[in-house]
Amino acid sequence: MRRMTDAADWSQAADPARRIGQAIEFHAEIESTNDRARAALSEPGGEGLAVVADLQTAGRGRRGRTWISPAGANLLFSVAWRPIIALRMAGLLGGSAALAVRDACASLVPDAGLAIRWPNDVVDRTGRKVAGLLVETALESGELAEAVIGIGINVNWLPSEMPPEIGGSATSLQALLGAPIQRVPLLGSVLDALHAEVQALERGGTPLPRLRASSWLDGRQVEVDTGTGTIAGRAAGIADDGSLLLDAEVGRLALSVGEVARVYEAIPATVAQ
């Protein structure tokens, strides 16, 4: 049986000096950590609160899908803040957050070749999903007013325990390391990295060089689901606004929305780090 980490344990991941994750709010069960994090923005001291759950009953993935996770196995949390960044940088929020997750996870499994699959999934060198992110933003008077970042990391969930529909395309830190992972220290590491990424963005820095160096898709033949249809082509890198560059039959496209539905090309032995 999995051990349920309690609120006192999770509080050890808090750091009052951080802009993101200065406090932790734990729920044994909640509908959606993203919804709770957004609501916290209207409360005193709520900005940057990290909302953690052992189980989400209505957790969301991208494109309206449900995030599936057994109770007590993985790391599920959301944070919200009011970004002080230009609207043109909004497309880089997901990439910055994905870099934070990748760096924290890579410190535990340095030989796994963790990379980022556009738009913001963290995958191992074979493309199996380790973590996913859902970034929800709100505008006010044409400016970026709120950003909610939901993060789900497969920590102690073995592929053999996953439903058949995802077991072949996902893995976990425990599977990559060969031993269980403590979730509270991992949360602290992710929040430290996320805090640093937020500060860099607000100072006008860009994650693009590191995002491009960590891209898993470059050079692969893919099919992208845009929500209104699919487009096939060869992934050609990340544009300055965070869009996926795709060399399709009609020429080079910059896709700002969508997700990779299929990868057709054989996977190379290594990826850029």
Image (spheres, rainbow, N blue to C red):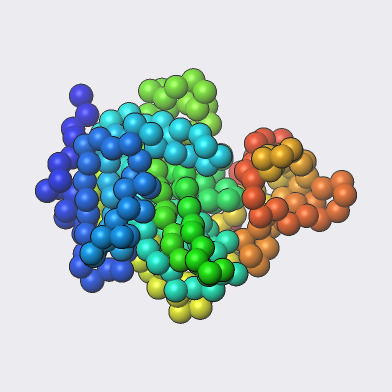
Foreground of the two, 227 or 22 = 227
What's the residue at 18%, 40% (across, down)? 5
Q: Position of residue 249 (x, y in %)?
A: 87, 46
The quadrant the N terminus occupies is top left
* Residue farthest bottom in this picture: 203
Q: Residue furthest right?
A: 250
* Residue 36 horizontal/vertical position (percent): 31, 48
Residue extending farthest to the top is 164
Q: In the rendered view, would you say 228 is above or below 105?
A: above
Which of the 4 image quarters holds residue 222? top right
Q: Is residue 65 visible?
A: yes
Horizontal and vertical percent position of residue 4: 19, 35
Up the image or down, 168 lies above or below 97; here it is above
* Quarter holding residue 31: top left
Q: Percent from the top left, x then y, of residue 147?
A: 44, 59
151 w.r.t. 85: above or below: above
Give me the residue at 53% from left, 69% from top. 141
Left or right: residue 86 compared with residue 237:
left
In this rendering, the count of numbered labels is 0
Asked whether 4 or 125 is in front, the reply is 4
Q: Is residue 251 left or right of residue 271?
A: right
